[in-house]
Amino acid sequence: VWASSNAPPVKSLYHPLVPDRILDTRYGTGAPTAKLGPGASMDLQVTGRGGVPSTGVAAVVLNVTVTEPSAASHLTAWPTGSPLPVASNLNYVAGQTVPNLVVAKVGSGGKVSLRNNSGQTHVIADVVGWYGQ
C-alpha cells in the first residue's frame, strides 16, 4: 500500500441520479416538437433540471438517443459556447434507434450543445449523473 500526503485533491466527484428525461423532441420536452435537421444544433439546458444543481456543475452524464433518423449521420455533444469538436458521440443509419452514454462538459449558461450532421432525427436525453467543480 502506498500513500502520500502530496496526493492531489479530489476536485470533481460523480453524483449519480435516477434517470430523468430532460429532452425528447418527439413530445416537446426541453425543445420544440420537431426533428433536429441537417447541420442543425440545439442548446440543451442541463443545470437546474433533472436533479442537476444550478451551480457547481463541471459536467453531466447523459444517455442520448437518436430515433427515426432519415439518413446516415452522427450526433455530437459539446459545451455550449465552445467550438464544435471533430468527434461524434453517436453514429447511426436511416431508421435506426441508437443510444449512447455521453459525458459532456457544461458550457455557457449551464448548457450542452447537440448537433446533427445529416438528415433529420429526433433526439432524446436522459440525465443520469453529474460531476461537481
Image (cartoon, rainbow, N blue to C red):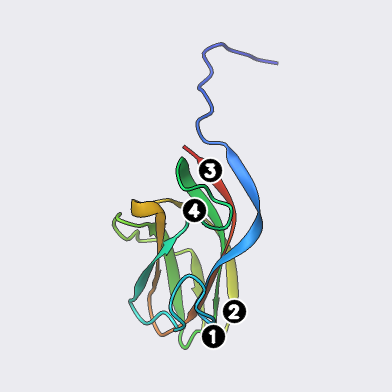
State which quarter of the image contains the N terminus: top right
- What kind of element bears circle 2? loop
Whether 112 is drawn above or below 10: the answer is: below
The CA span between labels 4 and 1 is 29 Å
CB of mark 4 within 8 Å of CB of mark 1?
A: no
How far from the left and from the top, in percent, is residue 109?
35, 53
Q: Tell me the CA gap for discs 3 and 2.
A: 27 Å
Q: Which residue is mark 3?
A: 131
Q: Earlier in the sequence, mark 4 or mark 1?
A: 4
Residue 25 image point, x, y percent: 49, 78
Q: Mark 1 to mark 3: distance in Å?
A: 31 Å
- Residue 68's label in the rendered image is 1
Q: For marks 4 and 2, give the one nearer the viewer.
A: 4
Chain-order first, disc 1 or disc 3: 1
Q: Which one is closest to the eye, mark 4 or mark 1?
A: 4
Discs 3/2, front: 3
Kind of residue sitting beneath label 2: Thr
Q: How far apart in space, not on screen, are marks 4 and 2 (Cα)?
A: 28 Å
Secondary structure type for disc 4: loop
Is mark 4 in CB contact (under 8 Å) with mark 3?
no
Residue shown at the point (33%, 52%) measured from the top left: 108
Q: How many neighbours does mark 4 have within 10 angstroms: few (below 14), some (14-19), or many (20 or more)? A: few
> Disc 1 residue type?
Glu
How packed mark 3 is, by other alpha carbons closer than 10 Å (few <14, some 14-19, many 20 or more), is many
**Front position in the image: 21 or 84:** 21
29 versus 35 height, above or below: above
Q: Position of residue 76 (x, y in %)?
A: 42, 65
Callout 1–callout 2 Cβ contact below 8 Å: yes
